[in-house]
Amino acid sequence: MHMVKLLFILAIGSFIGTLAVGCSSEPPHPKIIYKSLSEVPADTLKKLQKSSFFFGHQSVGKNILQGVEELAADNPQINLKVVLMENPAEISPGTLGHTRVGENTSPKMKIDEFQSWIEDGIGKQADVAFLKLCYVDIDADTDVAALFNHYHQTMTDLKARFPEVRFIHFTAPLTVSKTSWKTRLKKLMGKTDLWEYNDNIKRNAYNTLLRETYQGKEPVFDIAAIEATGQDGQPVTFSLEGKTYYSLNPAYTPDGGHLNELGRRQVADALLALLASLS
């Protein structure tokens, strides 16, 4: 099997199958994990209105929520309202409550503010909660190990203090990695420090840590794998020094980072299927 295709299958498998194995400290995992809305039975979709969800995010999160609203309009049986929250007391069943946390380029601030929202009331009300970092939060200069350690320690603390909440772990979104003739020339010359690739390489490194830590144990939403996957099922990748990395599919973005209608609906479809599986 072609190596790139194999890598894609393994990674997307972690997104689909990461919830299949339970552990003693987590609530029982659902037996069936749906990967798209087309697979979700109507009765299961209706369960969304009985659960409350909290989402901390920034700009790409706004794209995803727009996709959720579009899909909900197309599928009335979803019956899940997207609500911008101003305080933790607003969340209720049938609600996907969300708020902007922290600032872009300051991922630790986002993690800390997400923690504050959970502590200030969300942790006693929400059934499911999740935080998404943005592509601008991780670049070539990011200490990936330190950032992930901060996230992991924060989530470990929150899970211990709020055991009734199911926390979903998001991989970091990607950007388009353009391979121009100049890039190819640099590679032929043996250069390994390529600005065209460096940011996404760090994002891929963070995502690898997240998958290795949580897949098969706790819920993982692999937004990076979804962003990289074309409608034909093939991943968009680039390679350097014998390693293959994911890149955002250009068909999903208007500017190389944010999601257009096609991209946001792809991500929102998978997210809603996962939320339905957890409901």
Image (cartoon, rainbow, N blue to C red):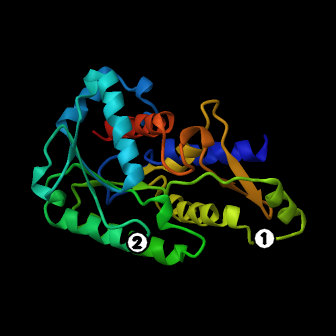
Residue named by callout 1 = 192
Please provide percent x and percent y for residue 101.
29, 62
Under mark 2, the amino acid is Ser
Estimate the x, y position of residue 276 in percent, counting from the top left: 32, 35
- Give the spatial CA distance, label 1 vs label 2: 27 Å
Give the residue displayed 11% in from the left and 50% down from the top.
90
Q: How many marks?
A: 2
Q: What kind of element bears circle 2?
A: loop
Q: Position of residue 208 (x, y in %)?
A: 57, 61
Find the residue positioned furthest to the right. 189
Return the mark for residue 106.
2
Q: Which of the pair 49/61 is nearer the observer?
A: 61
> From this viewpoint, is residue 237 visible?
yes
- Earlier sequence position, callout 1 versus callout 2: 2
- Mark 2: give few (<14), some (14-19) or many (20+) Cα within 10 Å: some
In terms of image quadrants, where is residue 66? top left
The C terminus appears in which quarter of the rendering?
top left
Question: Local crowd at mark 1 within 10 Å, few (<14), some, or many (≥20)?
Answer: few
Q: Looking at the rendered structure, which numbered label has been put on residue 204? A: none
Location of the N terminus (image quadrant): top right
Q: Position of residue 12 (x, y in %)?
A: 57, 44
75 lies above or below 110: above
In this picture, residue 31 sits left or right of residue 112:
right
Q: Could you tell me which residue is drawn at 82 percent across and 59 percent down?
A: 182
